[in-house]
Image (cartoon, rainbow, N blue to C red):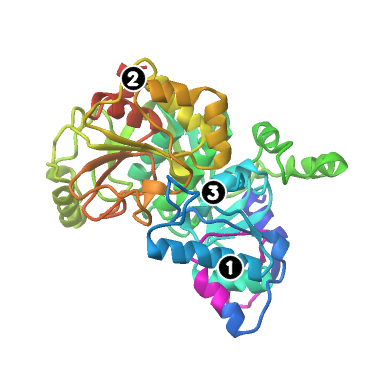
């Protein structure tokens, strides 16, 4: 009667503190440059080493520029953080994938593609979007800097066990509807706090039909519903995706591990703390209009009128629209935009570039639009060129930048100017997220591509 979450969690319990948290063993710790400096300083002050350095993987991604990575970083703050991560990794004997290394990229893209993120394991990182790795059938969640120090020192963490939720999405997605649209739909239905305190298992025909890239996108956005994390039970797609990757088990070890992975599913009679079910027919391509990811609508719908908003939400709703320069009841289709961003740990994978290219092929970028197309890793960058996607994009007037978090967040050179509208495939649209005063509209790669070639918010189904 156990859920898959219970099975993985219980397998990693070291001890349970009476009336307190669980001491949980962690199989993988991922580190980037933003949330680790104080953690490493804490180890030095306590004269501690890393307990299991081979289980720890470090790479810069948030502060890295997406051009001229072979040259010194110009921004002094970014340079200091990137340099500190390299120095700390070397000093403590950790795996380090530096800039310009073929192993580098966004940590939440690199982990799955290299086979570091595997079914049945526990993964943490000082980054909320660690939930991405749940697509591999892992229990993965973000932690704070003090907890990063805890895992560095002991390979364990103290955590309260979350409640379990299963979200089933039934049916078949219509043309032009992507996993990103599914996630945006769920966020609008549940709100950005509707899954607080839960770990979500995604299920149903829609999820089973998703590619691994699609599942990674869906799990990435779990945190935006307030969830502790989200994951998908591993299946043949998962095993095929992992097989042959650099860090996956090989030979006899593969067969033995695969036999275990095939047991990783919730029992038929498993009881979840909460169950929810949705229908694919209700989901169309989506966009956001406000300043949190839950403020979204179907692309053919209008922004809600004030009368449709709960009394307790009216003040924040009005504030968000003022920031975005939009009106209640306004139609988003045809709205002029200034920037398009394809990338981030949400949509920086090869499948996302294929989707974007499928819309822009044979068309031209709108002259009024600035477009930043940023692969999630050097492996994705390489594949874009191997598949000739770069040629399609170049002929349409686009260029491919170098890997990094880029315009997902204003921690590097790729900032959206104040007052400008950005159609972005990233995960957050908070005030100032992409730059002070920037106005972010979250979308799928298909919606972003349609906006890039028309200069306005466009239903991609009209161009497919």
Picture layout, residue 55 above or below residue 306: below
Q: Is residue 310 above or below residue 347?
A: below
Which residue appears at 52% of the width and 29% of the height?
384
Identify the mark at residue 108; answer none if there is no mark: 3
Residue at 48%, 39% in the rendered image: 375
Q: Is residue 321 left or right of residue 243?
A: left
Q: Position of residue 291 (x, y in %)?
A: 26, 50
Could you tell me how far apart the alpha carbons at marks 3 and 2 are, in whole angstroms? 30 Å
Instruction: Tell me the SS state at disc 1.
Output: helix
In this view, 118 is above or below 181: below
- Please identify the quarter of the rendering in which residue 122 is found: bottom right
Foreground mark, 3 or 2, reads 3
In primary-sequence order, the first of circles 3 and 2 is 3
Chain-order first, disc 3 or disc 1? 1
Mark 3 crowdedness (10 Å alpha carbons): few <14, some 14-19, many ≥20: many
Q: Are marks 3 and 1 in contact (CB under 8 Å)?
A: no
Q: Nearer the viewer, residue 242 or 389?
A: 389
Residue 70 lies, in percent from the top left, at: 50, 49
Residue indicated by mark 2: 461
In the image, farthest residue toward the top: 362
Q: Secondary structure at mark 2?
A: helix
Residues shaded magenta? 16-41
Sequence order check, earlier mark of 1 and 2 = 1
Counting from the top left corner in percent of width and height, residue 188 is at 33, 43
Residue labelled with disc 1: 87
Q: Can the viewer see residue 200? A: no
Indicate yes or no whether the magenta region holds residue 354.
Answer: no
Q: Is residue 66 left or right of residue 439?
A: right
In percent of width and height, residue 60 lies at 52, 56
Q: Residue furthest right?
A: 252
Q: Disc 3 and disc 1: Cα gap in Å?
A: 22 Å
């Amino acid at each position: 009667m156990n859920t898959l979450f219970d099975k993985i969690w219980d397998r990693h319990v070291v001890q349970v503190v009476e009336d307190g948290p669980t001491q949980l063993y962690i199989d993988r710790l991922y580190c980037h440059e933003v949330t680790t400096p104080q953690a490493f300083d804490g180890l030095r002050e306590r004269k501690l080493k890393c307990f299991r350095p081979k289980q720890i993987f470090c790479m810069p991604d948030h502060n890295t520029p997406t051009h001229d990575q072979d040259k010194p970083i110009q921004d002094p703050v970014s340079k200091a953080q990137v340099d500190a991560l390299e120095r700390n990794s070397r000093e403590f004997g950790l795996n380090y994938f530096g800039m310009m290394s073929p192993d580098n990229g966004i940590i939440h893209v690199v982990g799955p593609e290299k086979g570091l993120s595997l079914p049945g394991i526990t993964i943490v990182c000082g980054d909320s979007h660690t939930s991405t790795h749940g697509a591999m059938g892992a229990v993965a969640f973000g932690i704070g800097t003090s907890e990063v120090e805890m895992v560095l020192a002991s390979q364990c963490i103290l955590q309260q066990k979350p409640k379990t939720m299963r979200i089933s999405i039934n049916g078949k997605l219509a043309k032009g509807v992507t996993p990103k649209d599914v996630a945006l739909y769920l966020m609008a239905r549940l709100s950005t706090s509707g899954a607080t305190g839960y770990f979500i298992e995604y299920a149903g025909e829609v999820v089973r039909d998703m590619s691994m890239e699609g599942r990674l996108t869906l799990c990435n956005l779990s945190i935006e519903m307030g969830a502790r994390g989200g994951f998908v039970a591993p299946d043949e797609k998962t095993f095929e995706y992992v097989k042959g990757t650099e860090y996956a088990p090989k030979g006899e070890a593969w067969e033995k591990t695969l036999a275990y992975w095939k047991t990783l599913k919730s029992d038929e009679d498993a009881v979840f703390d909460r169950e929810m079910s949705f229908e694919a027919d209700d989901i169309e391509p989506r966009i956001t209009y406000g300043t949190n990811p839950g403020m979204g609508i179907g692309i053919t719908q209008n922004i809600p009128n004030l009368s449709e908003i709960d009394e307790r939400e009216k003040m924040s709703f009005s504030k968000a629209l003022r920031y975005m320069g939009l009106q209640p009841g306004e139609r988003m289709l045809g709205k002029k935009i200034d920037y398009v961003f394809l990338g981030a740990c949400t949509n920086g994978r090869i499948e996302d570039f294929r989707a974007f290219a499928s819309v822009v092929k044979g068309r031209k970028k709108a002259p009024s639009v600035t477009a930043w197309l940023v692969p999630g890793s050097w492996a994705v960058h390489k594949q874009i060129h191997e598949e000739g996607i770069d040629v399609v994009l170049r002929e349409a007037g686009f260029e491919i930048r170098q890997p990094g978090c880029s315009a997902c967040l204003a921690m590097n050179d790729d900032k959206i100017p104040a007052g400008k509208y950005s159609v972005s495939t990233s995960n957050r649209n908070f005030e100032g997220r992409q730059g002070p005063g920037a106005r972010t509209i979250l979308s799928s790669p298909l919606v972003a591509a349609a906006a890039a070639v028309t200069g306005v918010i466009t239903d991609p189904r009209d161009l497919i």
